[in-house]
Image (tube, rainbow, N blue to C red):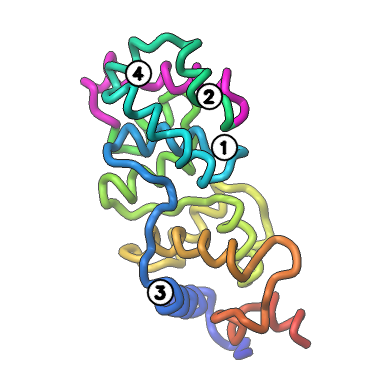
Amino acid sequence: MDNTISDKERAQLAVNALKEAYPEAVCSLVYKKPHELLIATRLSAQCTDARVNMVTPALFERYKTPADFAAADLDDVEKLIKSCGLFKTKARDIVGMCKMICDTFDGKVPDTIENLTMLPGIGRKTANLIMGDVYGKPAVVVDTHCIRITSRLGFHDIKDPVKIEKILKDLLPTNDSNDFCHRLVLHGRAVCTARNPKCNDCVMKDFCKYAEILIK
């Protein structure tokens, strides 16, 4: 590995490698409307995207708009999302966020990080996902895959998502940041797993600091 390259150069190499390996950079949560992505992401906490995608069709058929969710019976929402886990808290947040969307934001999902994080149950990770996928604005979604892989690449050695977000915003090309984060999820599931990463099969092994140590 060439240790003379800067983090900025390494970030560009990572962007290029993942773009070639995973040309389709899409969110794995299925949705059609902005509020549906917001709700699906809230449901995904400590739950697989596959499970969320099994639950949301019936949920979104029953409640079609933020106003529908705002007026929903909490017990009914809980029953529909029960298999996602933490269903009482998630149901309360879903109804609460939709009430705020209707009462404070005229029924439209907000388009700024500051306003999105005002919604019940919505942190910066979800807010950045909405900013990137719904509104097409530069965003960095710092999830567990992002934290793990960018640490292994050598960009940081911390766990604080807010600090990592700032580091990556400074390193990544603006127009590639959102898709890069989607590709990290795909790569984290397939190759750079939490346990026993497949470094020999990794498209980033030639410039990844973790792979350099492991492959030796």
Mark 1 and mark 3: Cα distance apart in space: 26 Å
On screen, residue 121 above or below 153:
above
Where the N terminus falls, by quadrant? bottom right
User: Is 12 situated above or below 98?
Assistant: below
Amino acid beneath label 3: Lys
Locate residue 142, reporting x and y percent. 52, 51
**In the picture provided, is 33 more to the left or to the right than 213?**
left
Q: Are marks 4 and 1 in contact (CB under 8 Å)?
A: no
Q: Taken as a whole, is the magenta stretch helix, strand or loop?
A: helix
The magenta segment is 85-109
Q: Position of residue 79 (x, y in %)?
A: 52, 18
Q: Secondary structure at mark 1?
A: loop
Measured along the vertical axis of the image, is residue 103 above or below residue 214?
above
In the image, is residue 87 part of the stretch drawn in magenta?
yes
Label 4 secondary element: helix
The three-letter code of the residue at mark 4 reads: Phe
Rounded to the nearest angstrom, the CA distance separating label 2 from label 1 is 9 Å
Counting residues from the N terminus, which is met first, the one under dot 2 or under dot 1? 1
Number of the label disc, if any, that sits on residue 90: 2
Q: What's the mark number on residue 69?
A: 4
x 31%, y 64%: residue: 175
Please give the label number shown on residue 120: none
